[in-house]
Amino acid sequence: MSDMNSIGLHESSASQLAEKLNHLLANYQIFYMNVRGYHWNVKGNDFFELHAKFEEFYTDLLTKVDEVAERILTLGHKPVHAYSDYVKLSHILEDKDVHDGKSCVKGVLAGYQTLIELQREVLSLASDADDEGTASQASDYIREQEKTVWMLNAYLGK
């Protein structure tokens, strides 16, 4: 009896990856809601610029939420889907009542930094498991988000 799943990965590796991806999914969901809140509530001189930028960010985050969940399913596992589970699993905390533009940008920056760190862990696990699909997805996200981190730091004058 083989311990390979339907896409040719060892089930034990797929299970580990799915667990790590569920943690990533939880962080994406909390971060998505934070950025959505920044979009709705930002105030100040940079309102128009930040309001539009936050919409761009949360639209991309929502796409990635779906892609991460679908990757978990591809591995033969179930994505968590209850908000209470997201709150328990996420390293990113809910950010409430933030409206100052600079504070919102700092929240976005911190969220992306957390996602990059988690995705590097996923990338390492995926590489060890010879899971090119998950590794490629994590690598693509990291590349995109590292550039975003650079831009957010530039915006903050760092």
Image: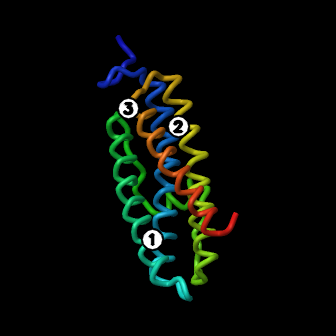
| Local secondary structure at mark 3 | helix
Q: In this rendering, which labeled residue sits more in front, label 1 or label 3?
A: 1
Q: Could you tell me which residue is drawn at 38 percent across and 40 percent down?
A: 72
Q: Residue furthest top?
A: 1
Task: Tell which of 67 and 79 is nearer to you.
Answer: 67
Q: Residues within 10 Å of mark 3 (few under 14, many from 20)?
A: some
| Local secondary structure at mark 1 | helix
Quarter the N terminus occupies: top left
Of callouts 3 and 2, which one flags the residue occurring earlier in the amino acid sequence?
Answer: 2
| Local secondary structure at mark 2 | helix
Of callouts 1 and 3, which one flags the residue occurring earlier in the amino acid sequence?
Answer: 1
Give x and y (percent) for residue 131: 42, 26
Taking the image as shown, residue 82 lies to the left or right of residue 20, namely left
Determine which residue is flagged by label 1.
53
Three-letter residue code for mark 3: Gly
Of callouts 1 and 2, which one flags the residue occurring earlier in the amino acid sequence?
Answer: 1
Determine which residue is flagged by label 3.
133
